[in-house]
């Protein structure tokens, strides 16, 4: 093998190593946006004109719990923070249980899910996010909840469920994270050695969002899969 060929192989290995590291990092980026999602939900709750007095009261309760949680995470640590989170979790659970399926119920379950996710209680977080989505399925937050269900399922190495819920997010109208969800689906299928399906996810991403940053990565994966003989 020529020196030039050796150099090219080393460059390819280096690129693949960096790309793999990128996959691991980007897998978790959205989870840092959860706090921002709650901020949006709070604003939505405040500006929404709600005629039902009980719904108004419920939203006020959830907003108060959310504010307490934010303050606790700023001011408390260790056991004191854990105890406060436990208290707020129970408050949110009480709100969810006494309200019918509506925006209040959904917001309360989302808050419960966020607390469990922060503790890496993947299954409990997943269950709460599913409940949040089902409580208000027509809300824009439902797709975000299902996305997080997919992330939790992947953490648990339940790839079938991860694919199921990430696929749900790709079917939601105007879901801004659809490109990321499609890329995640492709990445998971690669992990399962379902290379043809991975390619289909990447191709759908490239066709639907030609200018998206995730499409650039998807095209790189398509080339790599082809070069490595993993796809036709």
Image (cartoon, rainbow, N blue to C red):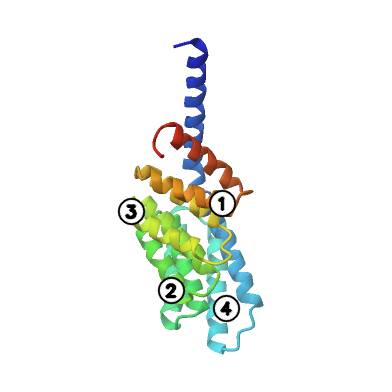
Q: CA distance from mark 1 to mark 4?
A: 43 Å
Label 3 or label 2, whichever comes before in sequence order: 2
Q: Residue at x 59, y 52 (%)?
A: 209
Residue pictured at 39% horizontal, 62% vertical? 126
> Which tag, 1 or 3, sits closer to the chain's start?
3
Q: CA distance from mark 3 to mark 2?
A: 21 Å
Q: Nearer the viewer, residue 99 or 17?
A: 17
Mark before the other along the chain sequence, 1 or 4: 4
User: Badge 1, how many Cα within 10 Å: few under 14, some, many 20+?
Assistant: few
Tag of residue 207: 1
**SS at mark 4 in the image:** helix
Kindly state the secondary structure of the residue where label 3 is placed.
loop
Among numbered discs 4 and 2, the one appearing first in the sequence: 4
Task: Report the residue marked by disc 3.
Answer: 158
Lower sequence index among marks 4 and 3? 4
Residue 230's quadrant in the figure? Answer: top left
Which circle, 1 or 2, is nearer the viewer?
A: 1
Residue 71 in sight in this render: no
Q: Is residue 19 visible?
A: yes
| Numbered badge on residue 134 | 2
Q: Is residue 133 left or right of residue 64?
A: left
Look at the numbered disc 1 and give the secondary structure of its residue.
helix
Disc number lying in front (1 or 4): 1
Q: Which residue is mark 4?
A: 60
Residue 82 at x, y percent in the picture: 43, 59
Quarter of the rendering occupied by the N terminus: top left
How many residues crowd mark 4 within 10 Å: few (<14), some (14–19), many (20+)?
Answer: some
In the image, residue 149 lies at what x, y percent?
Answer: 42, 60
- Residue 205 x %, y %: 53, 51
Q: Position of residue 130 (x, y in %)?
A: 41, 68
What is the CA distance from the residue labelled 4 to the residue labelled 2? 21 Å
Residue 52, above or below 152:
below
């Amino acid at each position: 093998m020529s020196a030039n060929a050796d150099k090219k192989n080393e460059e390819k290995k280096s690129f693949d190593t960096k790309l793999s590291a990128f996959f691991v990092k980007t897998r978790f980026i959205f989870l840092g946006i959860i706090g921002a999602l709650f901020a949006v939900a709070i604003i939505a709750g405040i500006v929404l004109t709600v005629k039902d007095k009980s719904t108004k009261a419920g939203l006020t309760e959830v907003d108060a719990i959310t504010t307490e949680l934010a303050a606790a995470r700023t001011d408390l640590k260790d056991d004191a923070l854990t105890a406060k989170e436990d208290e707020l979790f129970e408050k949110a659970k009480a709100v969810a249980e006494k309200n019918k399926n509506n925006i209040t119920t959904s917001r309360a379950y989302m808050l419960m899910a966020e607390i469990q996710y922060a503790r890496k209680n993947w299954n409990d977080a997943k269950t709460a996010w599913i409940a949040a989505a089902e409580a208000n399925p027509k809300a824009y937050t439902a797709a975000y909840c299902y996305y997080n269900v997919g992330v939790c399922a992947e953490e648990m190495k339940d790839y079938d469920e991860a694919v199921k819920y990430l696929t749900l997010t790709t079917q939601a109208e105007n879901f801004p994270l659809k490109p990321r969800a499609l890329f995640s689906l492709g990445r998971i299928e690669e992990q399962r050695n379902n290379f043809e399906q991975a390619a289909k996810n990447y191709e759908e991403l490239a066709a639907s969002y030609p200018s998206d940053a995730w499409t650039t990565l998807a095209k790189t994966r398509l080339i790599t899969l082809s070069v490595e003989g993993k796809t036709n």
